[in-house]
């Protein structure tokens, strides 16, 4: 599989880690997250201006999808689709391609993976 135009190996690695390891990525020190935001030229982030997540307080909160994540949203539950742009799985779950998927990285990048 070739990388989409404009993606580097570093960018894809960060994106995959962002989906596969939400617990670790979310616990990254603020300073490290700011370095990523600077590298990807993310817009300024003020979490105090974020909207209240739909479903809160009944849901588990995680950072919204993407490297430039700023606001918290409700986590995806077991069996729900997940991926780079479609949402992060809740704590204790990981976003994985469906067994037999011929393009597992594409599944994660395109939101065809599932929280397990």
Image (cartoon, rainbow, N blue to C red):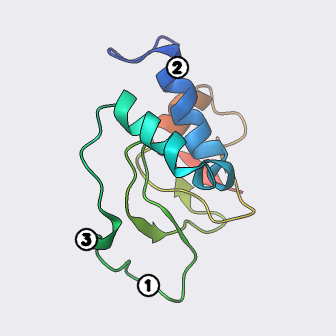
Q: Nearer the viewer, mark 2 or mark 1?
A: 2
Element type at marker 3? helix
> According to the image, label 2 marks what residue?
10
- Residue depth check, mark 3 versus mark 2: number of the one nearer the observer: 3
Residue at left offset 25%, top offset 71%: 49
- Of the pair 99 and 63, the residue shown nearer to us: 63
- Relative placement, left or right, of 63 versus 89 is left
Q: Residue at x 57, y 62 (%)?
A: 80
Disc 2 crowd rating (10 Å Cα; few below 14, some 14-19, many 20+) is: few
Between discs 2 and 1, the one toward the N terminus:
2
Image coordinates of residue 26 in percent, x first then y, are: 59, 55
- Looking at the image, do the residues carrying marks 1 and 3 touch, with CB atoms under 8 Å apart? no
* Observer-nearest of 113 and 69: 69
The label on residue 21 is: none
Which residue position holds label 3? 49
Instruction: Locate residue 47: give its quadrant.
Output: bottom left
Q: Are marks 3 and 2 in contact (CB under 8 Å)?
A: no
Secondary-structure class at tag 2: helix
- Where residue 35 appears, as percent x and y from the top left, is 45, 35
Q: Is residue 75 left or right of residue 95?
A: left
Instruction: Give whichever of 1, 3 is nearer the camera.
Output: 3
- Cα separation, mark 2 vs mark 1, equals 34 Å
The Cα–Cα distance between marks 1 and 3, rounded to whole angstroms, is: 18 Å
| Horizontal and vertical percent position of residue 109 | 48, 35
Quadrant of res 20: top right
Q: SS class of the residue under badge 1? A: loop
In the image, residue 107 sits, relative to residue 4, either above or below, namely below
Q: CA distance from mark 3 to mark 2?
A: 30 Å
């Amino acid at each position: 599989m070739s990388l989409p135009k404009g993606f580097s190996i570093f960018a894809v690695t960060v994106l995959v880690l962002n989906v596969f390891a939400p617990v670790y990525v979310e616990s990254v020190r603020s300073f490290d997250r700011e370095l990523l935001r600077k590298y990807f030229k993310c817009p300024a982030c003020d979490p105090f201006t974020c909207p209240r997540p739909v479903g809160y307080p009944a849901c588990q909160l995680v950072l919204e999808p993407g490297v430039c994540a700023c606001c918290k949203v409700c986590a995806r539950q077991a069996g729900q689709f997940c991926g780079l742009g479609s949402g992060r799985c809740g704590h204790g779950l990981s976003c994985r391609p469906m067994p037999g998927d011929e393009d597992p990285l594409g599944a994660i990048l395109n939101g065809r993976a599932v929280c397990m």
